[in-house]
Image (tube, grey):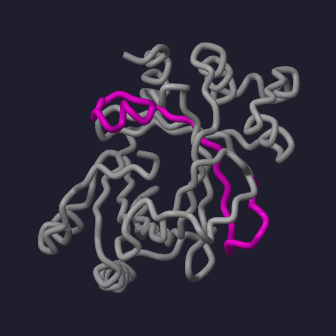
């Protein structure tokens, strides 16, 4: 069991349970599903009309512990990443966030902390000066990051970029459905990465459909998923 999982559990108990369920679909299915869902959903208010680009740098240990835990199917696992969002691939990042994501089977515990660009650059270069994080030292994510860095010497190992279309269901609190495609990865820990020659993590014809919700999924959506024979998949962009 992961060291520090107890505190993650307490964090989960202080919030509503959050679930993430993923499906692999084709581009054709994506368009059909989006057209149907738009009767009950709307584009995320923070998203441009055609979605946005997500850029992430993932951390791991020297022997890729987090990666192996995913491959081996451990129900309880954790990962750290630096994430940014861009309206287009060539835009400057719309903020940089240090994130922790812990998983207990299908229950998700996620938190983030906004960090200035220069501090993120230091974290990525592994030039971590704890004093430079003093303004954020009380934040849970920063505390956990420092702990894992000292204990397991985690470092940036992979950069991943993809296009995301995010929808929010109307009349359901915090019910989010995302469509991720053109998922590319590189064996690097740099902030400014050219993905033009990067490899696809998944075949380019596939889309990751992800349903994210608190507590329960509406019965009509469950029936819709069943009717279209969508099969739940354990998909991770870093794995």
Is residue 87 a member of the stretch shown in magenta?
A: yes
Quadrant where the N terminus sits is top left
Quadrant housing residue 106:
top left
Query: How many numbered discs, if any?
Result: 0
In the figure, 36 relative to 199: above or below? below
Quadrant housing residue 33:
bottom left
Residue nearer the viewer, 121 or 217: 121
Residue at 79%, 65% in the rendered image:
92
Residue at far front of view: 197
Residue 115 location in percent, x, y? 77, 42
Residue 206 location in percent, x, y? 35, 71
Residue 45 location in percent, x, y? 60, 71
Residue nearer the viewer, 6 or 199: 199
- Magenta residues, as a range? 66-95
Residue nearer the viewer, 207 or 223: 207
Residue at 19%, 68% in the rendered image:
225
In the figure, 159 relative to 136: above or below? below
Quadrant housing residue 34:
bottom left
Residue at 54%, 32% in the rendered image:
60
Is residue 148 a member of the stretch shown in magenta?
A: no
Residue nearer the viewer, 81 or 239: 239
Residue at 66%, 61% in the rendered image:
85
Left or right: 139 in relation to 66: right
Quadrant where the C terminus sits is top left
């Amino acid at each position: 069991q992961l060291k520090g999982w107890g505190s993650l559990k307490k964090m989960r108990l202080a919030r509503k349970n959050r679930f993430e369920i993923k499906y692999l679909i084709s581009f054709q299915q994506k368009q059909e599903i989006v057209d149907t869902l738009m009767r009950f959903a709307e584009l995320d208010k923070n998203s441009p009309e055609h979605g946005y680009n997500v850029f992430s740098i993932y951390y791991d240990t020297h022997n890729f512990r987090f990666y192996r835990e995913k491959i081996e199917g451990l129900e309880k696992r954790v990962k750290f990443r630096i994430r940014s969002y861009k309206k287009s691939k060539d835009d400057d990042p719309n903020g940089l966030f240090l994130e922790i994501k812990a998983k207990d089977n299908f229950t998700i515990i996620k938190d983030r902390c906004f960090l200035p660009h220069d501090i993120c650059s230091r974290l990525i270069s592994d030039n971590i000066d704890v004093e430079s994080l003093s303004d954020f030292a009380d934040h849970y994510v920063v505390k956990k990051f420092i702990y894992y860095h000292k204990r397991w010497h985690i470092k940036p190992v992979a950069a991943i970029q993809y296009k995301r279309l995010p929808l929010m269901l109307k009349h359901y609190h915090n019910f989010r459905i995302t469509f991720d495609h053109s998922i590319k990865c590189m064996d690097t820990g740099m902030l400014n990465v050219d993905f033009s020659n990067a490899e696809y993590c998944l075949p380019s014809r596939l889309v990751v459909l992800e349903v994210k919700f608190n507590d329960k999924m509406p019965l009509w959506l469950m029936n819709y998923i069943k009717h279209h024979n969508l099969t739940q998949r354990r998909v991770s962009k870093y794995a």
